[in-house]
Image (cartoon, grey):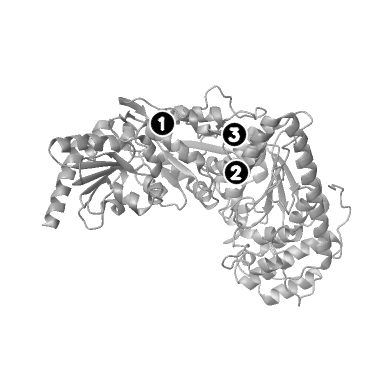
Amino acid sequence: MSNEQIDRAPDSTEIPMLVTNTIRTLSMDAVQKADSGHPGTPMALAPVGYTLFDSFMKFNPKNPDWMNRDRFILSAGHACMLQYSLLHICGYDISLEDIKQFRQLHSKCPGHPEYNLTPGVEATTGPLGQGVATSVGMAIAEKWLAANYNRPEYKIFDYNIYAIASDGCMMEGVSSEAASLAGHLGLDNLVWIYDNNRITIEGETDLAFSEDVATRFMAYNWNVLRVGDANDFMFLKRALQIAQEEVDRPTLIIVDSHIAYGSPSKQDTAGAHGSPLGEDEIRATKEYYGWDPDKEFYVPNEIYEYQKKIMERGRDQEREWEELFERYTGDFPKEAEEIRMIRDGRMPTEWDCCLPEFEADEKGLASRKSNSQVLNAIAEKIPWFLGGSADLAPSTKTLIEDEGSFAKGEYKHRNLHFGVREHAMGAIANGMALSGLRPYVSTFLVFSDFMRPSLRLSALMDQPVIYIFTHDSIGLGEDGPTHQPIEHLASLRAIPNVEVIRPADANEVSVLWKHILNLRNRPVALVLTRQGIPTFDREKYASADNALRGAYVLADCEGTPELVLIATGSEVQLCLKAYERLLSEGIKARVVSMPCWSLYEDQDDEYKDSVIPPEVDARVSVEAGSTFGWRRYTGRRGIGSIIGLRDFGASAPVKDVLKEFGLTVDGIVDVAKRTIERSEQRRS
């Protein structure tokens, strides 16, 4: 890999400018053909992209998932034609025809980069700040992998993470959270390139942004460099070389650029931010570059000769690493097999034999506490299972016992401390999951609002991040409505591809971890109580193993029930007590524990009808949260009832709060009887 300096600006026939102008013109043409997109930043940052991919990054276009590749994240996702053009030029499986289909249905080149859709795209980006925050998770993962698996003479993991950030990324709060933590941890394998073009959609950035970014990042303990002209190949190389040599801090390279560089009328204007340049402007700009204005989607033959060299270099880099790993396997077979499992997303054999079983206990314990026991049992079996909380481990009970803290210079440990930074925590977890680790993160359920953008991207990228949300209802009492989640269960369930799990007792917690860790293509929101809940007598009631079907009959009557009580989490215990009272009064009732709606919906109709018989109209759902969405299970004919909340909670002792909102055994029994009456009236 060459790092020699360029002593003069190359002319338009030399490879640096040929690649640079190919990126620019492909970007302009693709946006124009789609009549949609952002041409300005690819035109500005083409020299940066070329320099980075040509002289600094290690990658193999024929194997985009090679474990020890460098990672490139385009946090400024609106500039995606920069990335697609680079990937095509470097030999990834993106054809010129794919680029011509930019922003079209089923294209490999969507309007913002999408993981799992475009080879070479490491993360889904577009929501500004998310990409750079995700890159911090990737840097953490590399540090952890290197600390745990590298050995003298064997640098199995030594890759770097590069991310391009926009002015918008710098304004979004998630980037500040992530940068603060990255500086604290001394992640010297991380480089952010800040495109300082001083233009946003509304106009010049000084409309709303005038802070000194360099000083801010120096305060974060970053190494801060500046390149005064994005077209200066020599200084771009110098800055990236210094970043590679930094051994104590992450690096921010501020690159001053001109949006829509070369465009006679749109350079340095908001007009190039989110719309095509126009055919006449494109012709004039191509002429400025020394390009044939009559050619569209033109890639010179010299570029494809250059591509062969890049691809050959990538094959050699991976081959050299594979030979190293083969020798490593001979010396460290156990560690090598763990690395393969991380790469393949596999779990150790019989990892789930360690899951604890809990004895029946009327007093029981909070599900956050039973979860702590399960989590620690899992950590003993899966070395790459790690995580932490947003400064709440004593409350969420998510600390791995007898394990140190991941810290600067102490990267081998598995307890992460994210500080009060929920938004960045979610994005960082995404970066860790994208790197093959199995991360969990935790906070109070009400604070899931802070991390919804990151959680949504977990779902969009099919990443199995585990979100542990405790303090899950008005049952936390005195803290009051600011901390009592109401709409949060419903809003989480509304996100596609998210498994929302709210266990009813300790054994449901334990059993459902089997499902959680076997998932490879979706995140989980595990929702747990602060207050104690009983551990059910499983000799009297159904086995907790049934929870693996999402919903099951926990307690039943003889024959067809007159009433079905459906609940999740801490309200299942109330339904069991109501059930016992109804049975004593001669009313045939059934209790259904429904810890996971989506898992239940995955079952076949025969099973679902066996749990909630369609012929039974009298149904009552009970959940200490919003009633939104429950009608699908209580029926749409107006007979079934929904016990929940249509307002915020209150600050008071738990028993008083639950009574105030009707979440008591008496309240459930009363609603159940009235529901049965309505059902009988309808039948008569």
Q: Which residue is mark 1?
A: 368
Whether 30 is drawn above or below 204: the answer is below
Looking at numbered disc 2 in the image, what kind of residue is underneath it? Gly
Give the alpha-carbon distance from disc 2 to disc 3, as whole Å: 14 Å
Please tell me which of labels 2 and 3 falls first in the chain. Answer: 3
Q: Is residue 478 or residue 374 the one in the foreground?
A: 374
Give the alpha-carbon distance from disc 1 to disc 2, as whole Å: 25 Å
Question: From this viewpoint, which residue is outermost toward the top?
Answer: 402
Question: Marks 1 and 3: which is nearer the front?
Answer: 3
Q: Answer yes or no: is residue 666 visible.
A: yes
- The reply to whether the C-beta atoms of the residues labelled 1 and 2 are less than 8 Å apart is no
Q: Which residue is mark 3?
A: 384
Q: Is residue 220 or residue 154 the one in the foreground?
A: 154
Whether 139 is drawn above or below 120: the answer is above
Q: Position of residue 78 (x, y in %)?
A: 61, 59
Q: Is residue 241 left or right of residue 647?
A: right
Secondary structure under badge 2?
A: helix
Question: Within the image, what quadrant is residue 311 found in?
Answer: bottom right
Whether 615 is drawn above or below 34: the answer is above
- All told, the count of numbered labels is 3
The quarter of the picture where the C terminus appears is bottom left
Q: Which mark is residue 431?
A: 2
Q: Decide: few, some or many residues near mark 3? Use Cα within 10 Å; few <14, some 14-19, many ≥20.
A: many
Q: Is residue 101 or residue 61 the one in the foreground?
A: 61
Q: Answer yes or no: is residue 136 visible.
A: no
